[in-house]
Amino acid sequence: MSSTSTAVHRPPTGADTHIHDDGSADTAVIYTPAVPVRAVSAGRMHIPGGKTTTPQRHRTTEAILTIISGYSAILSGHHLETALPRPGDMIYIPPATPYCVVNLSLNASVLILSFRGDPGFSADIEHLPDLGPQVLRQVDKLRSDHMHRLMSRRTGHVRRTR
């Protein structure tokens, strides 16, 4: 792999997209060998409404997730603790940390930019299907709480006539 002395523009069109059994899709945009990267990669994650990614971990590398759009929950760690990022928020995933992304909406997609310390983008991913039942036990409550938050936000105080 040769280095370059200029910026490399790589649009996601025609990039390497992998559609998973859980319905989510990863698109590796900046990764080796497509771009002469040495220590990082970047891509997009698309999670359709009502879907949850399969629990996974990156064996030796870090990841940063940037929420672009949609309502999501990130379940991470051995106890699958919940983070509720909003669009624009970033989530740091340490190496070997189990995590999954839950789309809290049943209709709208979640779009995430993923930055990884793995130049191959997905070379060190280990899927953890044994955590699936633990994730499923949390998903319904997370979605119910999300709907309650949305409805509470939309129903403010009503002015009463005298």
Image (cartoon, rainbow, N blue to C red):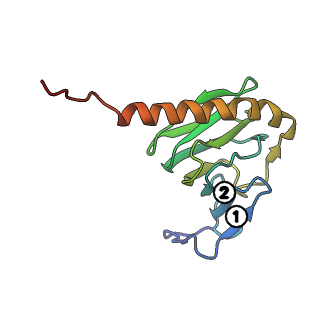
Which residue carries the number 1 mark?
32
Residue 17 is labelled as none
Residue at 82% across / 33% down in the picture? 133
User: Label 2's element?
Assistant: loop
Residue at 52% across / 36% down in the picture? 147
CB within 8 Å, label 2 to label 1? yes
Which badge, 2 or 1, is on the more N-terminal residue?
1
Pick the front one: 73 or 142:
142
Query: From the viewer's perspective, is the residue at label 2 or at label 1 nearer?
Result: 1
Label 1 crowd bin: few (<14), some (14–19), many (20+), radius 10 Å: some
Q: Is residue 17 left or right of residue 21?
A: left
Q: What is the residue that sits farthest to the right in this orientation?
A: 130
Q: Position of residue 55 (x, y in %)?
A: 76, 40
Q: In the picture shown, does residue 21 fall above or below 148? A: below
Q: In the picture shown, does residue 136 fall above or below 8? A: above
Q: Position of residue 90 (x, y in %)?
A: 51, 40
Q: Position of residue 4 (x, y in %)?
A: 57, 70
User: Label 1's element?
Assistant: loop
Residue 38 is labelled as 2
Pick the front one: 74 or 155:
155
What amino acid is found at the position of numbered circle 2 in the picture? Arg
Q: Is residue 160 visible?
A: yes
